[in-house]
């Protein structure tokens, strides 16, 4: 019996060890059929975006049968997964830096400065993707011009023009609620994915405390002396919208996947959901039309802003066992015909000067071409980790567990703590 149990123990131990050896660094190993396997992690979440990258990956694998791409699109779980991988120093071969190419992921990425695509990089992205030494941290699939998406037909039906200020925005929401008799949600927020709440606060913080000359506190945010009570008006405006019934009642449970069907049914007027929302909704209902506009100004006399930088990127892990194959994939996706697929699928402007791709929102980008693109607030002015704080405090505000003043206080506390780490 003891011999039998010893044998069982040995088999179990061997199995665990073997499984551990198999899994460790699996994304960097060759497959059983002799192919090289590369792991690719991206933050894309909308259906159109997923289809676009899947099409490009399929094209690459067809033309490069010796390379297999393991595509991973974990959506809202992306950051948590990458944090675990950073802690274990076991990064994917290829991964999206989603705006943190230098500050968060810089030590994990290989330099791409000698790749062909770099000579065509839009100069607007130089400070984001390059450092003073000339290192290039990631390849930009496209670039972002974030604002607010809206249902063109709904606005026309109720006589509402795209607002230019935050007060005009609230008036527009009130008009839609009144005239639609509650049939249309004025502002729809998928807060069940709390990063979408963080996105709203991140976009609106820029016109609140950066772009207006009399209310510009960028230096104070950078040196740590910012008075966080100046952030309170943003939380007050969001809370005002909720208390007036201008935000969906299920804001804390609604999921981003619902956006496409709801806007296709003309049930949404405005939303901060972007990406492939327009083409995805139009595919469901050819009569619907989704527009996009810059974020409204907060202070009298200020102008609207696009909020942007790179949208999706691909960095190469400095520890990948297959750097040449990884570079081959980036060479492939950086070709104009493939970037056009991505621009159309993501409904975002291309990031290279040798690509002239039309996408679903092109007419709106041209309409607002004189509007300045401001960098994402958290990437320039906040320490790493504050995005999560913006998301959770915003969620607590909408759940009535934080007042606007308490929200600003908590933001200030976490800002100080994270700066001192």
Image (cartoon, rainbow, N blue to C red):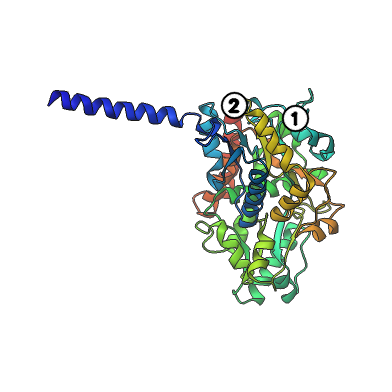
| 180 in relation to 379, above or below | below
* Quadrant for the N terminus in the image: top left
Residue at image coords 57%, 49%: 394
Quick one: SS at disc 2? Answer: loop
Q: Residues within 10 Å of mark 1 (few under 14, many from 20)?
A: many
Residue beneath label 2, please? 321
Residue at image coords 69%, 30%: 102
Q: Looking at this view, name the residue that lies furthest to the front.
A: 33
* Quadrant for the C terminus in the image: top right
Residue 258 pos. (x, y %): 56, 62
| 348 in relation to 153, above or below | above
Viewer-closest of 363 and 280: 280
Viewer-closest of 63 and 409: 63
Q: Earlier in the sequence, mark 2 or mark 1?
A: 1
Q: Which mark is residue 106?
A: none
Q: Which mark is residue 136?
A: 1
Viewer-closest of 24 and 168: 24
Q: Is residue 379 visible?
A: no
| 64 in relation to 421, above or below | below
Residue 315 pos. (x, y %): 67, 34
């Amino acid at each position: 019996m003891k011999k039998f149990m010893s044998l069982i123990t040995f088999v179990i131990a061997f199995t665990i060890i073997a499984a551990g050896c198999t899994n460790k660094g699996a994304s960097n190993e060759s497959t059983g059929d002799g192919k090289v396997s590369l792991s690719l992690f991206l933050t894309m979440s909308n259906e159109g975006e997923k289809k676009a990258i899947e099409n490009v990956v399929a094209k690459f694998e067809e033309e490069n049968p010796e390379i297999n791409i393991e595509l991973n699109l974990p959506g809202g779980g992306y950051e948590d997964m990458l944090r675990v991988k950073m802690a274990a120093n076991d990064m994917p071969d290829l991964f999206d830096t989603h705006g943190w190419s230098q500050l968060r992921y810089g030590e994990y990425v290989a330099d791409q400065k000698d790749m062909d695509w770099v000579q065509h990089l839009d100069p607007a992205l130089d400070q984001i993707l390059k450092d003073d030494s000339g290192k290039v941290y990631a390849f930009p699939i496209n670039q972002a011009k974030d604002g607010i998406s809206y249902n063109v037909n709904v606005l026309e039906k109720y006589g509402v023009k795209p607002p230019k200020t935050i007060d005009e925005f609230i008036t527009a929401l009130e008009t839609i609620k009144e005239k639609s008799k509650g049939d249309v949600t004025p502002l729809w927020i998928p807060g069940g994915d709390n990063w979408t709440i963080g996105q709203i606060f991140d976009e609106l913080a820029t016109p609140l405390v950066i772009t207006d000359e009399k209310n510009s506190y960028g230096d104070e945010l950078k040196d740590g002396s910012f008075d966080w009570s100046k952030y309170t008006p943003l939380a007050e405006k969001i809370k005002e919208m909720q208390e007036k019934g201008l935000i969906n009642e299920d804001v804390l449970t609604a999921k981003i996947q619902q956006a496409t069907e709801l806007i296709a049914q003309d049930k949404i007027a405005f939303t901060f959901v972007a990406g492939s929302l327009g083409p995805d909704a139009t595919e469901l209902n050819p009569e619907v039309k989704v527009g996009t506009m810059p974020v409204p100004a907060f202070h009298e006399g200020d102008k609207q802003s696009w909020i942007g930088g790179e949208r999706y990127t691909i960095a190469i892990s400095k520890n990948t066992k297959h750097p040449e194959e990884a570079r081959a994939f980036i060479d492939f996706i950086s070709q104009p015909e493939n970037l056009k697929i991505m621009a159309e699928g993501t409904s975002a402007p291309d990031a290279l000067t040798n690509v002239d791709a039309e996408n679903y929102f092109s007419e709106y980008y041209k309409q607002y071409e004189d509007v300045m693109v401001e960098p994402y607030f958290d990437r320039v002015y906040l320490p790493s980790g504050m995005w999560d704080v913006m998301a959770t405090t915003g969620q607590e505000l909408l759940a009535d567990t934080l007042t606007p003043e308490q929200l600003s206080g908590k933001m200030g506390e976490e800002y100080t703590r994270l700066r001192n780490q």
